[in-house]
Image: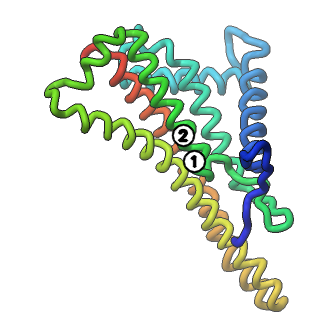
Amino acid sequence: MGHGNPTYEFLGLYFNLSNILMITIASVIVFILAVAGTRTLALKPTGMQNFVEWVVDFVKGIIGSTMDWQTGGRFLTLGLTLLMYIFVANMLGLPFAVIVDHELWWKSPTADPTITLTLAVMVVALSHYYGVKMKGAKEYGKDFFKPLSFLFPLKLIEEFANTLTLGLRLYGNIFAGEILLGLLAGLATNGYAQSFASGIVGTLVAAIPMLVWQGFSIFVGAIQAFIFVMLTMVYLAHKVSHDH
């Protein structure tokens, strides 16, 4: 587990090459899925079109549970993109990890707090943007002093807390899953390094828990993508709806 991240320095800034690689791969996969699902549209959907339409209906359900469709319909593309991207990103590190010269190159991008907190900041910033756009700056500013003006500092703290919890919840669940998978894989490989007999025992001991945990990690990755999108819509509804 003692590995670092490949970094590159440019103009005094350090870039995590692993994050850049995995973000790009996740984006390309989502793009391919979207194109494959919408390339040949038919009245009776089959294959990838059927899958994409199911995802669209699923996101519509999330939006409908947080705000009326007239208000929330504009966030369909955002929710669809977040759901597909975060799910794909969560899954990338499950099958395997690639380590070269003690540097981790292949992992789930959401197993890095920089990525998840960036997504959280983007969501919170969008909620403020749409709040001002749909309510007007004056009316939106008044919301921070409701129901009592002295609660304004708490409202500011809430914004920071929402950002941290939204990003760190996703990071913690995905990172913990990859750590445990790495430990289970190490149980088998370390056994081989010791002796053939202990290697067989280590493999048998590690294989079943690893398969079980991978299945559970797929479930957790899907749930975390759902929770992230749900909370995104809750935050947006809180900012743009006039009854909040």
* Relative side of 209 to 153, left or right: right
Disc 1 marks which residue? Answer: 221
Q: Residue at x 50, y 12 (%)?
A: 74
Q: Nearer the viewer, residue 192 or 160?
A: 160
Tell me, for residue 95, which label it has, or none. none
Image vertical order of residue 217 relative to residue 61, above or below: below
Q: CA distance from mark 1 to mark 2?
A: 6 Å
Q: Which mark is residue 225?
A: 2
Task: Looking at this view, name the residue that lies furthest to the front.
Answer: 11
The amino acid beneath tag 2 is Ala
Residues 101 and 38: in front is: 101
* Relative depth, front residue between 57 and 25: 25
Q: Is residue 38 visible in this depiction of the protein?
A: yes
Marks 1 and 2 in Cβ contact (< 8 Å): yes
* Location of residue 105 in the rendering, given as x and y in whole percent from the top left corner: 79, 55
Residue 82 versus residue 205 in the image, above or below: above
Q: Is residue 201 left or right of residue 172?
A: right
Q: Residue at x 79, y 44 (%)?
A: 10
Quadrant where the C terminus sits is: top left
Provide the secondary structure element on which disc 2 rests. Answer: helix
**Quadrant of the image occupied by residue 143:** top left
